[in-house]
Amino acid sequence: INAFATYSTGFKPVGLNLGGLPSASGAPLIELAVIKPEAVSHTELVIKTTPTPASTLNLTLYNTDIKDYQTQVQSPELGINRGYLANAEKVRVRGVEFDGNIRVKKFLTLYANLAYTDGKYVTFTNAPLPLEETGKSVDGVQVAFKDVSGGELPGISNWAASYGADLSKTGKFFRKTGSFYIAIDAYYRSGFSSSPSPSKYLVIDGYTLLNARIGF
């Protein structure tokens, strides 16, 4: 059994938006031209084991906090058809990952990986409007931003898994010595948001990929 913990920090410098800034009352929002530096704090705990000489079993827990997260967003304004960089005040990603494999005799290998990930905007008060709220106005004034604090981060599935089996046997093929094999792999990920601001219309459904192969 091996166990270790790590703590690390990361940094991304100041950024600039050179074009495509959103506007209010017909004037560009100059305060969005400069993007604040991003600071990352990451903690990880890992346990690696070999229950038997032919198997491994590993577990990882982690937490990542990001201050002034630099994210690409899309303005809902009709006159702007490009994205721009924005700062989300605070973002958090945490999760747990498991992986293991076992070799049965000399001809069969089995493996499985499972991960749970929780990615949230802890604070993001000036996010662009989601698709269904584009053009929204209050008292005749068009709304350009929304507080999406607590919303899900885009591109992150809560669940992901992969598993498979590999069966092989030594033999000859056209007088060449080698291994015949049959293998099956499967991968699954649950649904995820594809929009910087969570939108019920921009959620990608979960899916499964299956790959089977045979060869020499």
Image: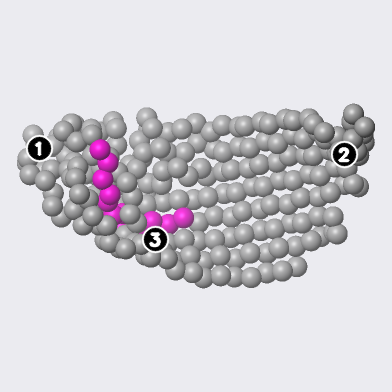
- Would you name the residue on which mark 1 appears? 141
Q: Amino acid at mark 3?
A: Ile
Residue at the image point whose x is 70% and y is 36% from the top: 185
Please state which of the two labelled residues, at mark 2 or mark 1, is closer to the viewer: 2
Please state which of the two labelled residues, at mark 3 or mark 1, is closer to the viewer: 3
Q: Are marks 2 and 1 in contact (CB under 8 Å)?
A: no
Residue most toward the front? 175
Tell me the element at label 3.
strand
What span is in magenta?
Answer: 82-93
Residue at the image point whose x is 39% and y is 60% from the top: 66
- Would you name the residue on which mark 2 appears? 178
From the viewer's side, name the closer residue of 190 and 162: 162
Tell me the element at label 1.
strand
Q: Reply yes or no: does residue 42 show up in magenta.
A: no
Question: Quick one: label 3 or label 2, which is nearer the N terminus?
Answer: 3
Relative to 54, say whether 77 is above or below.
Answer: above
Percent coordinates x, y for residue 65 in the rendering? 42, 62
Question: Quick one: label 3 or label 1, which is nearer the N terminus?
Answer: 3
Question: Quick one: label 2 or label 1, which is nearer the N terminus?
Answer: 1
Measure the alpha-carbon separation of dots 2 and 1. 73 Å
* Residue 184, picture quadrant: top right
Query: In the drawing, what numbered circle is on residue 66?
Result: 3
Percent coordinates x, y for residue 83 in the rendering? 27, 41
Q: Amino acid at mark 1?
A: Val
From the viewer's side, name the closer residue of 93 and 179: 179
Q: Is residue 61 left or right of residue 119?
A: right
Measure the alpha-carbon separation of dots 3 and 1. 33 Å
